[in-house]
Amino acid sequence: MALADQTSLPRRPAGTGGPADEPFGPRFVAPLYLGAALNPVNSSIIATALVSIAAALHIAVGDTAILISSLYLTSALAQPAAGRLSEVFGPRRVFVTGILLVLAAGVVGSLAHSLAALIVARVLIGAGTSAGYPSAMLLIRRRAERAGQDAPPRQVLGGLAITGAATVAVGPAIGGLLVGWFGWQTAFWINIPVAVLALALALAGIAPDTEPVRVGSARVLAARLDLLGMALFGGSLTALVVFLNELPHLEWAGLVAALVLAVALVGWELRASNPFLDVRLLAGNRALTRTYLRNGLTLMGTYVILYGLTQWLEVARGLSAYQAGLALLPMGALTAVTARVVANRTGVRLPLVACGALLLVGAVAVLFIGSSTPMAVVIAVSAVFGLTAGAGTVANQTVLYQEAPAATVATAAGLLRTFGYIGSIASAAITGTAFHTRVDDGGLHRIAWVLVPIAAVVLAMTVLDRHLADAGQSQTN
């Protein structure tokens, strides 16, 4: 598919003056960064509200894990789908539509009084926030091409990760404060003002898509979007989540269904003219596939600590939602700082190796944390995972941008987030299983024992990946 420009910028040779010399100014990047941050907003703030939601709805804390998995399940499918829709219909249209869905979700969640209604709100949030990142990646690539650049400045791509990291940094503390003052509904109504601001910035800073929408017949549209591939992908993920959410009970039907649908997905995508999940690309481009796996496993380790440690601090240590969020503030702050540092580097191998090593160190350290451990030690251990998240997110994104085909960068970017969401779904299942009966030190240590081998795998696959030696060197300064 040709990469037609979706902005109104004229093509100018570099150095002639005018907009092409400064294509990535604040007016353009601000809405992209805010839109890409909408998902981290909802990921971090909800962590401080789970205990309050469980108390208000008279359900077990472990049952609230569905509020995590429902968002990530939706996002896991919607991210690459939004990427494909951006490539077909235009990234600005998809970006704005996503913001409107987030706005609607904020209203639904604020007025909800049941777990079912909250799940609906989280699904809407997942669908809406999924538009931000892949459409932003496509807008940035097309902007760079229009300006005559081989690649955008590293700081621009890094800004997407840094914005998300900064959101995670302040999310638990601000979320805990707001939840403590105004109730758990804050985790939902906070989307209303943020979405309104993002919408205003997008309409003012991103030029309308220049190509008209050509829908065509239903059959042609289904082929262009690969709707069957999307359905099989979504069905396989849904079945997998059903299996994970039932742990420690083994729901074999869910696992079998996930595997059968996955096999059907591969078979269909090998024949599809415009595959939603390009199986041949994943098999042939092993560097891209390793990046997906590395990103998913790293984020699983980060989020299992974010959710697990938050619940443990509130229940086992008796902290309020605000105090728990404040305790995790250094973790988020170091994520943002590390992301900024890595974004200014040319190489990615060292940050990724450090990411794997720190993940392993943090996992082992959690084994020695208990109810009597000084808070300073708990905060220090959580901060290790902040370093991990910051280094891994930016470096993996850099590798993706280089390895993904230019024509499908939005879908590829969506898949990067999808693997992250699968890791996050797994983290919710791990947390829910570990704290199935009660939230205590034993449950926290069970989480750590699961995380140790995962961290070892991440470190090993990174150290042994020779392809990373040259990755990141071609990014524009």
Image (cartoon, grey):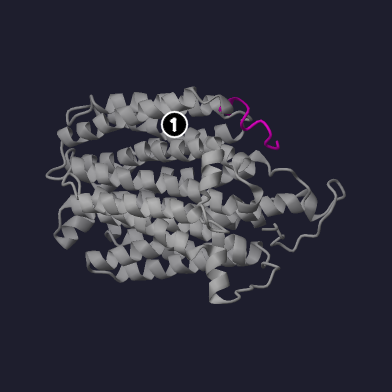
**Image quadrant occupied by the C terminus:** top right
**Residue 462 lies in the magenta-colored region:** no
What segment carries the magenta color?
468-477
Position of residue 17 measured from the top left corner of the image (x, y, whole percent) = 85, 51
Q: Quadrant of residue 236?
A: bottom left
Looking at this rendering, what residue extends furthest in the left direction?
437
**Tag 1 secondary structure:** helix
Amino acid at circle 1 = Leu
Q: Quadrant of the N terminus?
A: bottom right
Please give the name of the residue rendered at 24% of the width and 29% of the height, measured from the top-left corner: 449
* Residue at the image point whose x is 39% and y is 67% from the top: 105
Q: What is the count of numbered marks?
A: 1
Tell me which secondary structure the magenta stretch mostly adopts.
Answer: loop
Residue 189 seen anywhere in this rendered image of the structure: no
Residue 262 vertical position relative to residue 302 in the rendered view, above or below: below
| Camera-nearest residue between 328 and 366 | 366
Q: Quadrant of residue 327?
A: top left
x 63%, y 45%: residue: 156
Residue in the foreground of this view, choosing between 4 and 312: 4
Q: What residue sits right under mark 1 in the picture?
A: 387
Q: State the image coordinates of residue 398 (x, y, percent, origin top left).
A: 58, 38
Q: Is residue 90 above or below residue 73?
A: below
- Is 387 positioned to the left or the right of 434 in the image? right
Where is residue 435 drawn, in percent x and y? Answer: 18, 42
Tell whether 70 sits left or right of 198.
Answer: left
Q: Relative to residue 417, is residue 472 drawn left or right?
A: right
Is residue 365 among what the camera can see?
Answer: yes
Q: Residues within 10 Å of mark 1 (few under 14, many from 20)?
A: many
Q: Is residue 470 magenta?
A: yes
Image coordinates for residue 349, horizontal then vertical, percent: 55, 26
Q: Is residue 202 above or below residue 312?
A: below
